[in-house]
Protein backbone atom coordinates (compact mmCIF):
# COMPACT_ATOMS: atom_id res chain seq x y z
CA UNK A 1 0.00 0.00 0.00
CA UNK A 2 1.30 3.49 -0.87
CA UNK A 3 2.81 5.43 1.97
CA UNK A 4 0.96 8.68 2.64
CA UNK A 5 2.01 12.08 3.91
CA UNK A 6 0.03 11.54 7.11
CA UNK A 7 1.93 8.33 7.85
CA UNK A 8 5.24 10.09 7.20
CA UNK A 9 4.22 12.87 9.57
CA UNK A 10 3.39 10.39 12.32
CA UNK A 11 6.73 8.58 11.87
CA UNK A 12 8.62 11.87 11.95
CA UNK A 13 6.81 12.96 15.12
CA UNK A 14 7.80 9.67 16.78
CA UNK A 15 11.43 10.23 15.76
CA UNK A 16 11.43 13.73 17.25
CA UNK A 17 10.10 12.37 20.53
CA UNK A 18 12.83 9.71 20.65
CA UNK A 19 15.53 12.31 19.99
CA UNK A 20 14.20 14.35 22.92
CA UNK A 21 14.50 11.27 25.13
CA UNK A 22 18.10 10.72 23.97
CA UNK A 23 18.99 14.30 24.87
CA UNK A 24 17.54 13.80 28.32
CA UNK A 25 19.61 10.59 28.71
CA UNK A 26 22.93 12.46 28.52
CA UNK A 27 22.85 12.80 32.30
CA UNK A 28 23.14 9.07 32.96
CA UNK A 29 26.25 7.59 34.54
CA UNK A 30 29.30 6.94 32.37
CA UNK A 31 28.73 3.21 32.58
CA UNK A 32 25.43 3.53 30.75
CA UNK A 33 26.55 5.99 28.08
CA UNK A 34 27.50 3.28 25.55
CA UNK A 35 23.91 2.07 25.56
CA UNK A 36 22.63 5.60 24.92
CA UNK A 37 25.21 6.05 22.14
CA UNK A 38 24.08 2.83 20.47
CA UNK A 39 20.48 4.06 20.55
CA UNK A 40 21.51 7.39 18.99
CA UNK A 41 23.38 5.62 16.20
CA UNK A 42 20.33 3.41 15.58
CA UNK A 43 18.12 6.50 15.23
CA UNK A 44 20.59 8.06 12.77
CA UNK A 45 20.55 4.88 10.72
CA UNK A 46 16.74 4.99 10.76
CA UNK A 47 16.79 8.52 9.34
CA UNK A 48 19.31 7.62 6.64
CA UNK A 49 17.75 4.30 5.63
CA UNK A 50 14.02 4.96 6.11
CA UNK A 51 12.89 8.54 6.62
CA UNK A 52 15.05 10.26 4.03
CA UNK A 53 14.15 7.89 1.13
CA UNK A 54 10.51 8.15 2.20
CA UNK A 55 10.72 11.96 2.05
CA UNK A 56 12.31 11.80 -1.44
CA UNK A 57 9.50 9.58 -2.73
CA UNK A 58 6.87 11.95 -1.42
CA UNK A 59 8.68 14.95 -2.88
CA UNK A 60 9.04 13.39 -6.32
CA UNK A 61 5.34 12.50 -6.36
CA UNK A 62 4.44 16.19 -6.10
CA UNK A 63 2.34 17.93 -3.45
CA UNK A 64 -0.42 15.81 -1.89
CA UNK A 65 -3.74 16.22 -3.61
CA UNK A 66 -5.98 14.71 -0.97
CA UNK A 67 -6.42 17.73 1.29
CA UNK A 68 -6.60 20.15 -1.64
CA UNK A 69 -9.11 17.95 -3.47
CA UNK A 70 -11.25 17.71 -0.33
CA UNK A 71 -11.29 21.47 0.04
CA UNK A 72 -12.25 21.94 -3.61
CA UNK A 73 -14.99 19.36 -3.22
CA UNK A 74 -16.35 21.14 -0.15
CA UNK A 75 -16.33 24.50 -1.93
CA UNK A 76 -18.15 22.98 -4.89
CA UNK A 77 -20.80 21.32 -2.72
CA UNK A 78 -21.29 24.52 -0.74
CA UNK A 79 -21.78 26.51 -3.95
CA UNK A 80 -24.23 23.94 -5.31
CA UNK A 81 -26.20 24.01 -2.05
CA UNK A 82 -26.40 27.81 -1.95
CA UNK A 83 -27.25 28.23 -5.65
CA UNK A 84 -29.72 25.36 -5.91
CA UNK A 85 -32.91 26.86 -7.42
CA UNK A 86 -35.28 25.16 -4.95
CA UNK A 87 -35.52 26.12 -1.25
CA UNK A 88 -33.25 23.75 0.70
CA UNK A 89 -32.54 23.55 4.43
CA UNK A 90 -30.16 21.35 6.42
CA UNK A 91 -31.55 20.47 9.87
CA UNK A 92 -30.61 18.13 12.70
CA UNK A 93 -32.73 15.39 14.24
CA UNK A 94 -34.56 18.01 16.35
CA UNK A 95 -35.43 19.98 13.17
CA UNK A 96 -33.07 22.80 14.22
CA UNK A 97 -31.75 24.67 11.18
CA UNK A 98 -28.06 24.20 10.38
CA UNK A 99 -28.08 25.97 7.01
CA UNK A 100 -30.49 27.63 4.56
CA UNK A 101 -29.70 28.27 0.92
CA UNK A 102 -30.51 31.52 -0.88
CA UNK A 103 -33.76 30.20 -2.35
CA UNK A 104 -34.97 29.13 1.11
CA UNK A 105 -34.32 32.56 2.63
CA UNK A 106 -36.32 34.17 -0.19
CA UNK A 107 -39.10 31.59 0.04
CA UNK A 108 -39.56 31.80 3.82
CA UNK A 109 -38.76 35.50 4.16
CA UNK A 110 -36.26 34.67 6.93
CA UNK A 111 -32.56 35.55 6.88
CA UNK A 112 -30.18 32.60 7.11
CA UNK A 113 -28.38 34.14 10.09
CA UNK A 114 -31.65 34.44 12.01
CA UNK A 115 -32.88 30.94 11.11
CA UNK A 116 -29.66 29.12 12.03
CA UNK A 117 -29.98 27.54 15.45
CA UNK A 118 -33.78 27.86 15.52
CA UNK A 119 -36.30 25.07 14.80
CA UNK A 120 -37.53 25.00 11.23
CA UNK A 121 -40.94 24.11 12.69
CA UNK A 122 -41.14 27.67 14.01
CA UNK A 123 -41.77 28.86 10.44
CA UNK A 124 -44.60 26.35 9.87
CA UNK A 125 -48.27 26.49 10.80
CA UNK A 126 -48.92 25.10 14.29
CA UNK A 127 -50.90 22.15 12.95
CA UNK A 128 -47.91 20.93 10.87
CA UNK A 129 -45.15 21.26 13.47
CA UNK A 130 -45.58 17.96 15.31
CA UNK A 131 -45.82 15.94 12.09
CA UNK A 132 -42.74 17.57 10.60
CA UNK A 133 -40.72 17.08 13.79
CA UNK A 134 -41.70 13.41 13.90
CA UNK A 135 -40.79 12.78 10.25
CA UNK A 136 -37.44 14.58 10.60
CA UNK A 137 -36.55 12.41 13.61
CA UNK A 138 -37.46 9.24 11.68
CA UNK A 139 -35.28 10.24 8.74
CA UNK A 140 -32.36 11.05 11.06
CA UNK A 141 -32.73 7.58 12.64
CA UNK A 142 -32.16 6.01 9.23
CA UNK A 143 -35.76 4.92 8.58
CA UNK A 144 -35.77 6.19 5.01
CA UNK A 145 -36.78 9.30 3.12
CA UNK A 146 -40.11 10.98 3.86
CA UNK A 147 -42.45 13.48 2.21
CA UNK A 148 -45.30 15.53 3.62
CA UNK A 149 -47.32 18.64 2.87
CA UNK A 150 -46.93 21.57 5.26
CA UNK A 151 -47.91 25.24 5.36
CA UNK A 152 -45.81 28.29 6.19
CA UNK A 153 -47.23 30.30 9.07
CA UNK A 154 -47.14 33.52 7.08
CA UNK A 155 -48.93 31.91 4.10
CA UNK A 156 -51.19 29.25 5.65
CA UNK A 157 -53.42 28.91 2.56
CA UNK A 158 -50.56 27.85 0.25
CA UNK A 159 -49.49 24.20 0.63
CA UNK A 160 -45.77 23.41 0.54
CA UNK A 161 -44.43 19.95 -0.31
CA UNK A 162 -41.45 19.02 1.93
CA UNK A 163 -39.08 16.17 1.00
CA UNK A 164 -36.74 14.91 3.73
CA UNK A 165 -33.67 12.75 3.17
CA UNK A 166 -30.75 11.80 5.43
CA UNK A 167 -27.18 12.92 4.71
CA UNK A 168 -23.99 12.47 6.70
CA UNK A 169 -21.55 15.39 6.28
CA UNK A 170 -17.88 14.50 6.64
CA UNK A 171 -16.69 14.75 10.21
CA UNK A 172 -20.21 14.70 11.66
CA UNK A 173 -21.00 12.02 14.27
CA UNK A 174 -24.72 11.85 13.42
CA UNK A 175 -26.77 12.06 10.21
CA UNK A 176 -28.48 15.32 9.35
CA UNK A 177 -31.66 15.86 7.36
CA UNK A 178 -31.81 17.64 4.01
CA UNK A 179 -35.20 19.33 3.52
CA UNK A 180 -36.36 20.44 0.05
CA UNK A 181 -39.41 22.72 -0.05
CA UNK A 182 -41.60 22.98 -3.14
CA UNK A 183 -44.74 25.12 -3.48
CA UNK A 184 -47.91 23.18 -4.13
CA UNK A 185 -49.37 19.77 -3.30
CA UNK A 186 -47.58 16.48 -3.93
CA UNK A 187 -48.10 15.44 -7.58
CA UNK A 188 -48.87 11.96 -8.82
CA UNK A 189 -46.04 9.98 -10.50
CA UNK A 190 -45.52 11.10 -14.07
CA UNK A 191 -47.14 14.47 -13.53
CA UNK A 192 -45.14 17.55 -14.51
CA UNK A 193 -43.13 19.08 -11.68
CA UNK A 194 -44.76 21.97 -9.86
CA UNK A 195 -43.79 25.42 -11.03
CA UNK A 196 -42.20 27.63 -8.45
CA UNK A 197 -44.64 30.22 -7.24
CA UNK A 198 -43.25 33.70 -6.66
CA UNK A 199 -42.49 34.43 -3.04
CA UNK A 200 -44.95 36.63 -1.25
CA UNK A 201 -44.09 40.28 -1.59
CA UNK A 202 -42.45 41.68 1.52
CA UNK A 203 -42.65 45.47 1.73
CA UNK A 204 -39.21 46.97 1.23
CA UNK A 205 -39.38 49.43 4.11
CA UNK A 206 -36.14 51.15 5.06
CA UNK A 207 -35.09 51.62 8.64
CA UNK A 208 -35.67 55.35 8.23
CA UNK A 209 -39.29 54.81 7.20
CA UNK A 210 -39.98 52.46 10.11
CA UNK A 211 -38.33 54.88 12.52
CA UNK A 212 -40.50 57.73 11.21
CA UNK A 213 -43.64 55.60 11.64
CA UNK A 214 -42.61 54.84 15.24
CA UNK A 215 -42.07 58.53 15.94
CA UNK A 216 -45.55 59.34 14.59
CA UNK A 217 -47.06 56.59 16.75
CA UNK A 218 -45.30 57.82 19.89
CA UNK A 219 -46.40 61.38 19.13
CA UNK A 220 -50.03 60.32 18.83
CA UNK A 221 -49.76 58.22 22.00
CA UNK A 222 -48.35 61.21 23.90
CA UNK A 223 -51.21 63.43 22.69
CA UNK A 224 -53.83 60.89 23.77
CA UNK A 225 -52.26 60.38 27.20
CA UNK A 226 -52.06 64.11 27.84
CA UNK A 227 -55.78 64.51 27.12
CA UNK A 228 -56.98 61.31 28.86
CA UNK A 229 -58.71 61.54 32.27
CA UNK A 230 -55.97 61.38 34.90
CA UNK A 231 -56.07 58.48 37.30
CA UNK A 232 -58.84 56.64 35.40
CA UNK A 233 -56.96 53.42 34.71
CA UNK A 234 -59.48 51.70 32.44
CA UNK A 235 -60.15 54.85 30.37
CA UNK A 236 -56.44 55.58 29.89
CA UNK A 237 -55.61 52.01 28.92
CA UNK A 238 -58.59 51.84 26.55
CA UNK A 239 -57.54 55.01 24.73
CA UNK A 240 -53.94 53.82 24.49
CA UNK A 241 -55.13 50.49 23.05
CA UNK A 242 -57.12 52.32 20.37
CA UNK A 243 -53.97 54.16 19.27
CA UNK A 244 -52.05 50.90 18.95
CA UNK A 245 -54.80 48.89 17.24
CA UNK A 246 -54.57 48.61 13.47
CA UNK A 247 -51.55 50.75 12.66
CA UNK A 248 -49.21 48.97 15.10
CA UNK A 249 -50.85 45.63 15.95
CA UNK A 250 -53.72 43.47 14.68
CA UNK A 251 -54.80 42.62 18.24
CA UNK A 252 -54.48 44.72 21.39
CA UNK A 253 -55.53 43.08 24.67
CA UNK A 254 -55.45 44.88 28.02
CA UNK A 255 -55.64 43.19 31.44
CA UNK A 256 -55.68 45.43 34.51
CA UNK A 257 -56.03 45.00 38.26
CA UNK A 258 -54.12 45.16 41.52
CA UNK A 259 -54.35 41.80 43.27
CA UNK A 260 -55.88 39.96 40.31
CA UNK A 261 -55.92 40.91 36.63
CA UNK A 262 -59.19 41.12 34.70
CA UNK A 263 -59.77 41.54 30.99
CA UNK A 264 -60.76 45.17 30.29
CA UNK A 265 -60.12 45.75 26.57
CA UNK A 266 -59.95 43.52 23.52
CA UNK A 267 -59.44 45.10 20.08
CA UNK A 268 -59.34 42.47 17.34
CA UNK A 269 -59.71 42.35 13.54
CA UNK A 270 -63.44 41.61 13.95
CA UNK A 271 -66.11 42.01 16.62
CA UNK A 272 -66.66 38.23 16.76
CA UNK A 273 -62.99 37.61 17.54
CA UNK A 274 -63.02 40.40 20.09
CA UNK A 275 -66.06 38.95 21.87
CA UNK A 276 -64.44 35.51 22.02
CA UNK A 277 -61.56 36.78 24.19
CA UNK A 278 -63.40 39.36 26.24
CA UNK A 279 -64.64 36.73 28.71
CA UNK A 280 -61.28 34.95 28.93
CA UNK A 281 -59.68 34.86 32.38
CA UNK A 282 -56.13 36.33 32.17
CA UNK A 283 -55.07 33.76 34.77
CA UNK A 284 -55.41 31.08 32.04
CA UNK A 285 -52.84 32.88 29.85
CA UNK A 286 -49.30 31.80 30.83
CA UNK A 287 -47.77 34.69 28.91
CA UNK A 288 -49.83 37.30 30.79
CA UNK A 289 -49.26 35.75 34.21
CA UNK A 290 -45.50 35.47 33.59
CA UNK A 291 -45.28 39.12 32.52
CA UNK A 292 -47.31 40.22 35.57
CA UNK A 293 -45.13 38.14 37.89
CA UNK A 294 -41.73 39.19 36.51
CA UNK A 295 -42.56 42.73 35.40
CA UNK A 296 -40.46 42.16 32.27
CA UNK A 297 -41.61 42.70 28.67
CA UNK A 298 -41.67 39.76 26.26
CA UNK A 299 -41.05 39.72 22.49
CA UNK A 300 -41.73 36.47 20.65
CA UNK A 301 -41.28 35.82 16.93
CA UNK A 302 -43.25 32.80 15.66
CA UNK A 303 -44.15 31.72 19.21
CA UNK A 304 -43.35 28.06 19.70
CA UNK A 305 -45.89 27.30 22.46
CA UNK A 306 -49.41 27.39 20.96
CA UNK A 307 -50.99 27.60 24.45
CA UNK A 308 -48.94 30.63 25.56
CA UNK A 309 -52.09 32.81 25.47
CA UNK A 310 -54.54 30.17 26.59
CA UNK A 311 -57.53 28.89 24.62
CA UNK A 312 -60.70 30.39 23.20
CA UNK A 313 -64.24 29.33 24.29
CA UNK A 314 -64.15 26.48 21.75
CA UNK A 315 -60.97 25.06 23.30
CA UNK A 316 -58.64 26.04 20.45
CA UNK A 317 -55.29 27.75 21.18
CA UNK A 318 -55.69 31.50 20.70
CA UNK A 319 -52.33 31.90 18.97
CA UNK A 320 -53.22 29.22 16.43
CA UNK A 321 -56.71 30.50 15.73
CA UNK A 322 -55.46 34.07 15.23
CA UNK A 323 -52.43 32.90 13.19
CA UNK A 324 -50.14 34.97 15.40
CA UNK A 325 -46.67 35.33 13.90
CA UNK A 326 -45.22 37.73 16.49
CA UNK A 327 -46.32 39.21 19.79
CA UNK A 328 -45.37 41.78 22.40
CA UNK A 329 -46.39 41.58 26.05
CA UNK A 330 -45.51 44.57 28.26
CA UNK A 331 -46.31 45.28 31.93
CA UNK A 332 -47.90 48.49 33.22
CA UNK A 333 -46.05 49.26 36.45
CA UNK A 334 -46.72 51.86 39.10
CA UNK A 335 -44.21 52.35 41.92
CA UNK A 336 -42.65 48.99 41.13
CA UNK A 337 -45.94 47.03 41.20
CA UNK A 338 -47.55 45.64 38.05
CA UNK A 339 -51.09 47.00 37.67
CA UNK A 340 -51.78 45.79 34.17
CA UNK A 341 -50.48 43.94 31.10
CA UNK A 342 -50.78 44.96 27.44
CA UNK A 343 -50.52 42.20 24.82
CA UNK A 344 -50.15 42.92 21.10
CA UNK A 345 -50.43 40.42 18.23
CA UNK A 346 -49.34 40.62 14.62
CA UNK A 347 -50.80 37.99 12.33
CA UNK A 348 -50.32 36.41 8.92
CA UNK A 349 -47.87 37.97 6.49
CA UNK A 350 -47.44 41.20 8.46
CA UNK A 351 -43.85 42.05 9.37
CA UNK A 352 -42.86 40.78 12.80
CA UNK A 353 -42.22 43.16 15.67
CA UNK A 354 -38.65 44.46 15.59
CA UNK A 355 -36.37 45.15 18.53
CA UNK A 356 -36.78 48.88 17.87
CA UNK A 357 -40.57 48.54 18.02
CA UNK A 358 -40.32 46.52 21.22
CA UNK A 359 -38.18 49.26 22.76
CA UNK A 360 -40.68 51.92 21.65
CA UNK A 361 -43.56 49.91 23.15
CA UNK A 362 -41.66 49.57 26.41
CA UNK A 363 -41.31 53.36 26.53
CA UNK A 364 -45.00 53.90 25.74
CA UNK A 365 -46.01 51.42 28.46
CA UNK A 366 -44.13 53.51 31.04
CA UNK A 367 -45.89 56.65 29.81
CA UNK A 368 -49.27 54.86 30.05
CA UNK A 369 -48.43 53.86 33.63
CA UNK A 370 -47.63 57.47 34.49
CA UNK A 371 -50.94 58.67 33.04
CA UNK A 372 -52.81 56.02 35.04
CA UNK A 373 -51.21 56.87 38.39
CA UNK A 374 -51.06 60.67 38.07
CA UNK A 375 -53.93 62.43 39.79
CA UNK A 376 -55.57 65.51 38.23
Image (tube, grey):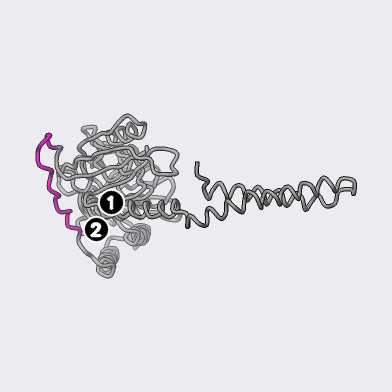
Residue 80 in view:
yes
Which residue is label 1 attached to?
344
Q: From the top left corner, tell me how far across and down residue 103 is, in percent.
A: 24, 53
Report the number of discs: 2
Which quarter of the picture shows residue 372? bottom left
Q: Quadrant of residue 357?
A: bottom left
- Classify mark 2: helix, strand or loop: loop
Task: Write the residue at 54% across / 48% down.
Answer: 6
On screen, residue 3 above or below 79: above
Q: Main secondary structure of the magenta part?
A: loop
Gap between marks 1 and 2, in whole Å? 9 Å
Residue for point 21% across, 39% down? 150
Asked whether, in this view, residue 184 is left or right of residue 29, the answer is left
Q: Is residue 9 left or right of residue 89?
A: right
Label whose residue precedes the other's in the sequence (1 or 2): 2
Residue at the (38%, 55%) spot, across then down: 72
Report if the CB atoms under discs 1 and 2 are less than 8 Å apart. yes
- Residue behind mark 2: 248
Viewer-nearest residue: 305 or 32? 32
Closer to the camera in the image, 135 or 264: 135
Amino acid sequence: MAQTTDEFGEELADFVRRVAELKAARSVSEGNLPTVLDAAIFELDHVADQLWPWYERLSSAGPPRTASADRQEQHLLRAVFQRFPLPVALVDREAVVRRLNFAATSFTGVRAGYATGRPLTGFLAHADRVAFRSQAAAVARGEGDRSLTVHLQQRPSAPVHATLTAVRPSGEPHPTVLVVLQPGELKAPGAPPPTAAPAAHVPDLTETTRHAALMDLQDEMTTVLLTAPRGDREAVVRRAAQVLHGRFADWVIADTGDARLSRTTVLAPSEEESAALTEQDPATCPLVTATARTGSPSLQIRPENPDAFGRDPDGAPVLVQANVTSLLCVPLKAEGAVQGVLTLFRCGARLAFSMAEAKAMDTMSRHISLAVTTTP
